[in-house]
Amino acid sequence: MGSPMVGIRALWAEKPVVRTRKCRDLLAGLDGYSKNSTIDMATITSTDSYDSSHKNRGVALVIVNEDFDPPREGANDDEMNMTSLFENLQFKVTTKSNLTADDVTTLLDEVLGRDDFHRNSDCFVFIISTHGREIQLDDGTHLQRLYCMENTFITTQTIVNKVNECDALKGKPKLFFIQACRFIKDRLGRDPGHDYVVKNGNFEDEAKADHLGHTRDLGSEEETEIVRHELEQNLNVQSRQYDDADPAEGPDSIPETKDDVYIPKVCLPKDTLIMYAIPSGYYARRQFDYGSVMLNKLKEVLEKIPEDRSSLLTALTNVAGKVAEEYEYEYNETTYKVVPQIHHRLRYDLYFTKKQTKI
């Protein structure tokens, strides 16, 4: 039998997802990280970064689902912010709103079918702002459900896998920014959400899983991204609680946590990065007046990187730091903070150097 170290080295060579066990570890790292970290572009070699010399920057696909009941107020700001950001970064931006799960699949097939464009592109970006929740499989893997129109959903994993199957994007960075809740049913006893009637659809696959009958008051300034469904046995009357209910003082109750934050098992292909608005088991935040917290800070930081000449990973670290440092909310006279979570298997860093021609 060979040495166990051989297997360990092989796994390490695959660049596994880096998992941060404690929030305080992440914040401590951010404190020591320069927010003005830049690099001399002349010193970058092909072994340091992904190839950014293609004719096209790439496609940025933006999906914003807003027309739920009640509507996701502020979601329109997400659409405008992401469109403006990625157009300024010289992406070819495709923006769609209020899609069903089938619509999302069809749109992905259409966009990913542009082989010639993708072969001449640096990377691919996918952004979605919607309701969400997570389920845990028997093997411990977590799947995030992204809720769509007409009572349908698609998983983040399905989207990532579909993009990863695009041959024209092989070896190129694929970036996903997911603005949606990641609460888990077993942890829902602390935040019952807001009930309202769903007139259409059945969510039959949820019938045995979600039986919740609590309510909470909503404020007017801020929403917590929450989705849940209370189904009557006959499925004719359904109460639904979305991942975007807006308590001005935060959730009615906060999930109990200690210093250790559970990082779920994820399936992540090479050359892929996912930035979630929130760690697993928590509720994402959205403001009525400027949209989702993570996407707002993403725009604020990334729109400066052509001038700052900072790398993508540096910039995203700064995004997480800004959310953690600048955003907080009060609940029961206690101040709470949220922080985005990044999973990646990028082999190199990525720089958005300015291109000479427009897309």
Image: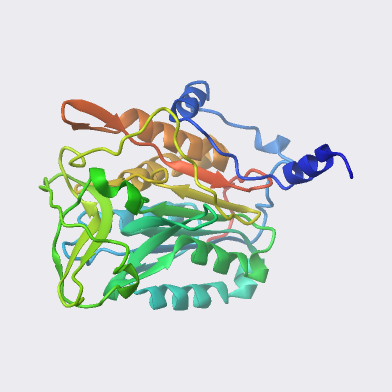
Q: Quadrant of residue 231?
A: bottom left
Is 133 on the left-hand or right-hand side of 212?
Answer: right
Q: Most extreme residue toward the right, as rendered?
A: 1
Front residue (pair 45, 331): 331
Q: Residue at x 18, y 62 (%)?
A: 71
Front residue (pair 56, 5): 5
On the image, the x and y values in percent for residue 253 come to: 21, 39
* Quadrant that contains the N terminus: top right
On the image, the x and y values in percent for residue 189 come to: 25, 46
On the image, the x and y values in percent for residue 46 come to: 75, 46
Is 124 on the left-hand or right-hand side of 44?
Answer: left
Q: How many marks?
A: 0
Q: Considering only vertical position in the picture, is 103 above or below 67?
A: below
Q: Quadrant of residue 58?
A: bottom right
Q: Considering only vertical position in the picture, is 167 above or below 136?
A: below
Q: Quadrant of residue 237?
A: bottom left
On the image, the x and y values in percent for residue 35 come to: 49, 28
Q: Residue at x 41, y 62 (%)?
A: 62
Query: Can residue 159 be seen here?
Result: yes
Q: Residue at x 48, y 58 (%)?
A: 137
Q: Considering only vertical position in the picture, is 278 above or below 324?
A: below
Q: Is the image coloured rainbow, by chain, by secondary structure, or in one colour?
A: rainbow
Q: Residue at x 28, y 51 (%)?
A: 225
Query: Can residue 181 be seen here?
Result: no
Is 250 on the left-hand or right-hand side of 101?
Answer: left
Is 262 on the left-hand or right-hand side of 296?
Answer: right
Front residue (pair 261, 179): 261
